[in-house]
Image (cartoon, helix red, strand yellow):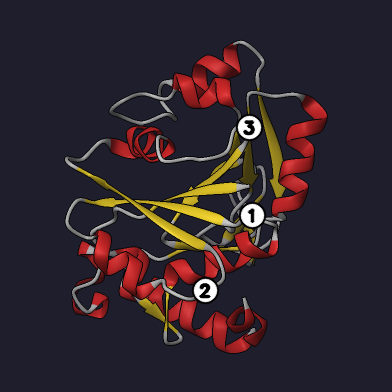
Amino acid sequence: MEAIILAGGKAERLGDAAQGKPKSLVPVAGRPLAVYQIGRLRNAGVERVILSCAAGQEELFTTELADIGVEIVTAGEPERLGRGGGIRFASRLRREEGEVFALNGDELIDVDLPGLLSRHHETGAAATIAVAQPPSAFGVVDIDAEDVVTGFREAGRVPFWVNCGVYVLGAEALERFPERGDHETTTFPELADERKLRAFRHDGLWLTVNTPKDLRRAEEYVAAHPEWLAA
């Protein structure tokens, strides 16, 4: 099986912490961030990973991600195509037919990829997306009917489901992805209206690296969970 990773992020909000590299190649515990996604994909049976990156960065990605146990292919976008356009552009380099994993290259996430694929097969969906209820950024204030504050509680999880950006895409879904733009505002709503889009609930790690604070959290997580270094 193959996978597509969106790796065109510029790491602008990371500043000097990015060391001048694309966000997917920013070091976390001494390894490029994308290595952790690729390791999980490899463990799920993926043998070929296509990275959608900015034109001119192909050699950098190939060098940084060499010798990690899967074939790495780069799809350099000649211009910014958006997330949906980037996935569609990269999909042209596929060798296999059937489903493909697609995910973002700037995250630590431990979605059960075999489980996601199994759910996709069970339902016969055009696409299956991992969803999560992330932790709330705010603590909870309890008040009574007279607006008397009765207590404070630590933040729980938000009461709605959020798209994690990890997908299994079938041929129909890929064919309907935009040449340019975001699939979450085009293809996915259309598939949802047709009841061809399914969800796979994820309650584990989901950490996006956008800022130096996020990068520190990722470093701390990997340090506390050395099994990720074996990915």
**Which of marks 1 and 2 precedes in the sequence?**
2
Q: Position of residue 202 (x, y in %)?
A: 69, 51
Mark identifier at residue 68: 2
The residue lying at 62 percent from left, 55 percent from top is 46
Q: Is residue 104 above or below residue 185?
A: below
- Residue at image x 32%, y 65%? 61
Residue type at tag 3: Gly
Pointer 2 local density, CA inside 10 Å: few below 14, some 14–19, many at least 20:
few
Q: Which residue in the protein does label 1 denote?
A: 157
Cα–Cα gap, marks 1 and 3: 35 Å
Q: Of residues 1 and 109, which is closer to you in this image?
A: 1
- For marks 2 and 3, give the CA distance: 24 Å
* Left or right placement of residue 44 versus residue 64 in this view: right
Q: Nearer the viewer, residue 192 or 1?
A: 1
Q: Which residue is mark 3?
A: 98
Counting labels gives 3
Number of residues whose C-alpha sits closer than 10 Å to that of mark 3, classed few (under 14), some (14–19) or many (20 or more): few
The amino acid type of the residue labelled 2 equals: Ile
Helix or strand or loop: what does disc 3 sit on? loop
Sequence-earlier tag: 2 or 3: 2
State the residue at coordinates (23%, 59%). 10
Under mark 1, the amino acid is Arg
* 68 on left or right of 230: left
Give the CA separation, mark 2 to mark 1: 35 Å
